[in-house]
Image: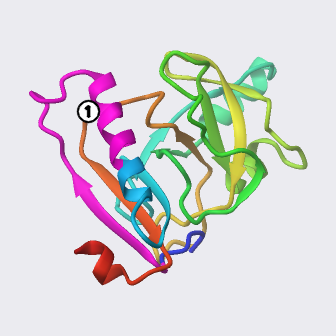
Amino acid sequence: MGFQPEHVLTFHIDLPERRYPKEDDFIRFYKNLAARLKALPGVQLVAESADVPWDGYDENSDFEIVGLHRRRIATLRRSTVLCRRIISVAVGTPLISGRFFAESDTPTSPTVTIVNEAFVRRYFPGQDPVGKRLNMWVKKGVLIVGVVGDVKPSPDAPAAKPSFYWDDWQYPQLLERVVVVRASSDLAGLAA
């Protein structure tokens, strides 16, 4: 599967835009919520995301690898099917190289991304892409800071797609979020 669903509790929150109209208010709410949840007995990890594995969300996008010859870029564009996922931390997905997103990754800091192993096999075969840069949409020079294991887009998918991940706090969208809590204790008690 590429992720670990055991001992995980998820729930959805859709904040009212009138009460949380600004990105700073939205981010502050989720950071405060995460701190409160982490203080509960048995909680090991808390994350929020616009999506989670196997939720049916799949959005394709193009990109350019900074420093790549233009002819090679044209070839990549013709053959690219790239899944974009917005996630604050790859919960239960192994880190292969580099790092996960950090508190220091904010809307005002340089934009970063994490890619999966399928992305590396396709676009950086035999290389570690950490430290390389991509141009995506209106974002130029997006820094690859980590590589994570592959997660199949659905249980019956033959393989993972090349994917990149945005940090929610760098690309905040005032939309519904999924909160993910990993715990060592009884999930029924934690849910209550």
Which residue is the site of mark 1?
174
Residue drawn at point x = 85 percent, y = 43 percent: 128
Callout 1 amino acid: Leu
Q: Quadrant of the image for the C terminus?
A: bottom left
Up/down of 19 relative to 2, above or below: above
Answer whether residue 79 is visible to the viewer in this image: yes
Q: Is 13 covered by the magenta stretch? A: yes
Image quadrant in which the N terminus is located:
bottom right
Where is residue 53? Give x, y as percent: 45, 63
Report the residue at 49% width, 80% height from top.
6
Q: Nearer the viewer, residue 87 or 78?
A: 87
* Relative side of 97 to 82, left or right: right
Instruction: Please state the horizontal and vertical placement of residue 177, each as a whole percent of the image.
Output: 30, 48
Work out whether residue 173 can be spotted.
Answer: no
Question: Foreground residue, 132 or 167?
Answer: 167
Task: Give the extent of the magenta segment.
Answer: 6-33
Characterize the local packing of mark 1: few (<14), some (14-19) or many (20 or more) Cα atoms within 10 angstroms.
Answer: some
